[in-house]
Structures are given as structure tokens and as C-alpha cells.
Image: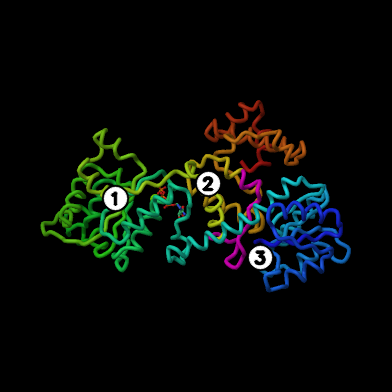
Amino acid sequence: MQRILIADDDAAIRGVLRDLLQDEGFDVDEVDSGQGVIDALGKVNSSRPSLVMMDVRMPDRTGLEVLREKRTTNGEQLPIIVMTAYGTSNVAIEAMQLGAYDYLTKPFDLDDVLLTVQRYFEHQRLSEQVLELSSRLGERDPNEVLIGNSAAMQDVYKTVGRVARSEATVLVSGETGTGKELIATILHRSSSYARGPLIKVNCAALPETLLESELFGHEKGSFTGAINQRKGRFEMANKGTIFLDEVGEMSLATQKKLLRVLQEREFERVGGTISVKVDTRVVAATNKILAQEIEAGRFREDLFYRLNVIAIHLPALRDRMDDIPLLVEHFVQKHRFTPSSEPARVSQGAMDALMEYDWPGNVRELENLIERATVLSHGGVITEQHVSFFGADSRRLIDVGERLRRGTTIKELLHDIERQAFTEALSQTDGDRVAAASMLGLKLPEFNKRSANFDV
Ligand SMILES: Nc1ncnc2c1ncn2[C@@H]1O[C@H](COP(=O)(O)OP(=O)(O)OP(=O)(O)O)[C@@H](O)[C@H]1O
Ligand SMILES: [Mg+2]
């Protein structure tokens, strides 16, 4: 059972909170001073609280002093929720910067109190889960951990687990940024080919003739510029894995050659006659729907069946939104402000914004956003101000009612609306400032002057 300590010099408040939390099944202790909190957190046995709800104003030591005393040098989060009087949001923010998990303002709404407490324990659970997922895959490298708990991701784990040790060819599909390359890396690391290299080829990046020589190598003099014999990626990947990224972009002629390699495990270098044999695991990826490409005559059906021995489809992030908190936890751990910083923390407001967005760029977009927000927040608390969606500003309408409830001034609100107007005008005119200015009924100098406030 979780133990919560309530620290407040007002016995009436302690009583209300105690009843509330006990009803929810928590063990509750009380103290009436800052020293009481310091003593309790210093305990090492089971009477140490899992969470402290602490008033900021107490007779002996203020809550902020307690936080300063308990704070570790690297700014680790403390299991403390601070309670402040209404209208002292600067104190609340300072408390969070000193490591408090969150704050509540008095007089409080009891539902809010419970929500914040539950969110704290949920956050603890998520951090533990990230650690567990990392260790389950036996990986230390945060770049090679596959995160997600949704049903769709559970299916992915199962398939990865089943095929990892086999030699079967795998076709990974999914939208941009869903983790196709990550899957290829994990498949390689856990296979019997892991002692060999993982060689990646982006089939979309090269024109047809170069791609062939890239994949299969060439003999000296086989074409202008082929001064020496050169080994191709397939030869380099011998005893390892070759990752054919964007395989749907390959020309039909190259597809034919690839089919032969898959069938016979041998090929000739461009301009050559001797057959080269390779023992290579093939993992291919595509963000196209290959069935449609086959239909349109752009992809060979026989090659599709050779590649698609095992299919792994990665779901779009918007179809597994319940994975977002876990992914966010993973990315704040992965992208520290400095290598020795504790992970940044994410406010509920920022999390709400992340949960409302539709994620066209999937996990990569989420990861980039967290990385950027960590820098903007100096590794402290990521709030909704640090969370911005590239090109999406104009799609997220400003909800005036919601903003008023959350607390805003008319100045802030108008500033945000104005920024949205500038961004949207620039995006509708493809960045043409003259056209954007005229769209907003402004002369160019005025447009430039005002838009300079928004870094657009
Ligand atoms: N399930 C996941 N858990 C943790 N990190 C992930 C997950 N999926 C993707 N990522 C991270 O997101 C980023 C993008 O992933 P990746 O490059 O594998 O996507 P992709 O599907 O190959 O995208 P593209 O089609 O644009 O090439 C990487 O940094 C990757 O580590
Ligand atoms: Mg990729």
C-alpha cells in the first residue's frame, strides 16, 4: 500500500485530505511542520512516505526551504506535491523548479487533489515500465529500445520475438517515423547474424544504375567511372543483415535482380560474369502499400511474396495514442538537457496537448518535439508553452474557454491568436511575406515588425 504524508499546520486541512486519501485506500500520516517532512523523508524503512503533500507556508520552515534542503545537485524529482494559496503561481513554479512533482492551489477542488495524486503514482509506474522494457530487450542503448504497450505493439513484440532467431526475410511496413528502421536494428541484434554487420541501403536515395552497383558491386570498367572493382552492399552484408529501406521505390529492373538474390542467394557484380554467393539476412521496409504498387504495375508480385515471408506492420501513433505517456517518459530519459541531468518532467497541460494532436510524423515527430522542449525548458518542467507542433499551429484552434479556465490574460491570449494568424498566413502563401501581409491587410513593414515578435 502507498503511504502519503500530509504536511500542513492547519489541522482542518489535514483532516479533509486524510479522509479523502484514506477513502481511496492510501495509508496516511500527518505532520504540522517543515522539519516533520525532512525527518520523514530521511527514514529508510517502510514508514518513509511514497508521496508528501506539503503546504508552502508553515511556521518553522517554508515548503521552499524544505525543497532546497532535500534537493539533490542534479535536480532529481522529489516525491512532493506542494500546496500553495491561490494566486501564488510564481511560488508554485519555483517549487517545481526545485524538484517538486506538481502543485495544488488552495482552496482546492478535491477531484483535482485525487487526480494529481493518481497522476504522481501513474508517473512512477510509467518510469518503472520504461526501465523494465529497456531491460527486457537486454539493451543498454536507448536508441534500440522499442516502447509501447498498446495491443498493436504487443502484436509487434510477439512477431519480433518469434522471427528474431530465424533467418526468414522480413518486410516491415508503416508510415514515416513509426520505427521501421528501429525494428530492423532490433531484428539484426537478436538474430544469429548479429555477429556480422548490419548494412543499410536506402533504395530511394539513388538513381537506378547507381543503386544496382551499390547493391551488387561492379567490375572494373563496367561503366564510365568504374575505375576499380567494387564490392556491393550484399557482399558487405555477408554473414550479417542487409536492410533495404524504401524497397517500394526500386525500379522494376532492379527488383528483378533482387528477386534472383532472394531465390538463389547469388548474383553477379554489374558488368561481371562470376557469381558471388552470400549468406545474408534480408529485412526490407516500405512506407508504401505494396499491394497497391503491385496493382499499379510498379512492384513485382513475385518479389513481394519473397520479401513478405514475415510481415511486421507498425501502427501509426494516432492509432495507439495510449502509448504516448510511455513514449514521452522514454524520450525525456533519452534526451537529457545535459548528460548528467535528471530527465525533464512534463506538465499535465503539455501532456494534454500531446494527446490531442494527430501526429502526422509519428514517433519521430514526438521524439523531436520532446528533445526540443527539453532544451527550451532547460531540462526542467515541460509545459504547454514548450510544446509546439511544426506546421500544426494553424490546425489547433485556440480554445478561448479552455484558456480562460486554465488562467490567462487577454494580452497572452491576443498574442497567441495573432501568432496563429501570422503563421497561418505565411503557410497559406508558402512563405511569401508580401502576399501574407496583404492577406492580413497590413503593409509589409508593419507585417515584418509585428511578425518579428513571433519568430515566424
Ligand atoms: N516504438 C518505439 N519506441 C521507441 N522509439 C521509437 C519507437 N518507434 C520509433 N522510435 C524512434 O523514432 C525515430 C524514428 O524511427 P525510425 O527511423 O525507425 O522510423 P522509420 O519508420 O524508419 O521512418 P521513415 O519511414 O521516415 O524512415 C527513431 O529515433 C526511433 O528510435
Ligand atoms: Mg526509416
Q: First in sequence: mark 1 or mark 2? A: 1
Is residue 335 inside the magenta stretch?
Answer: yes
Distance of label 1 from label 3 (alpha carbons): 44 Å
Q: Which residues are magenta?
A: 334-352
Question: In which quadrant of the rendered image does the N terminus lie?
Answer: bottom right
Secondary element under disc 2, as helix, strand or loop, is: helix
Residue 155 image position (x, y, % from top left)? 39, 50
Residue 104 image position (x, y, % from top left)? 76, 51
Secondary element under disc 3, as helix, strand or loop, is: loop
Residue at the spot 30% in from the left edge and 54% down from the top edge: 283
Residue to which mark 3 is pinned: 76
Residue at the spot 55% in from the left edge and 59% down from the top edge: 335
Q: First in sequence: mark 3 or mark 2? A: 3
Residue 195 image position (x, y, % from top left)? 31, 68
User: Relative to residue 188, is residue 177 drawn left or right?
Assistant: right
Q: Tell me, for residue 90, which label it has, or none.
A: none
User: Relative to residue 57, is residue 94 drawn left or right?
Assistant: left
Q: Nearer the viewer, mark 1 or mark 3?
A: 1
Q: In which image quadrant can residue 98 be found? A: bottom right
Q: Tell me, for residue 310, which label it has, or none.
A: 1
Crowding at mark 1 (Cα within 10 Å: few <14, some 14-19, many 20+): some
State yes or no: discs 1 and 3 in contact (Cβ < 8 Å). Answer: no
Q: First in sequence: mark 1 or mark 3? A: 3
Residue 176 image position (x, y, % from top left)? 42, 45
Distance of label 3 from label 2 (alpha carbons): 26 Å
Residue at the spot 39% in from the left edge and 45% down from the top edge: 174
Three-letter amino acid code at the position of disc 1: Ile
Three-letter amino acid code at the position of disc 3: Glu
Distance of label 1 from label 2 (alpha carbons): 26 Å
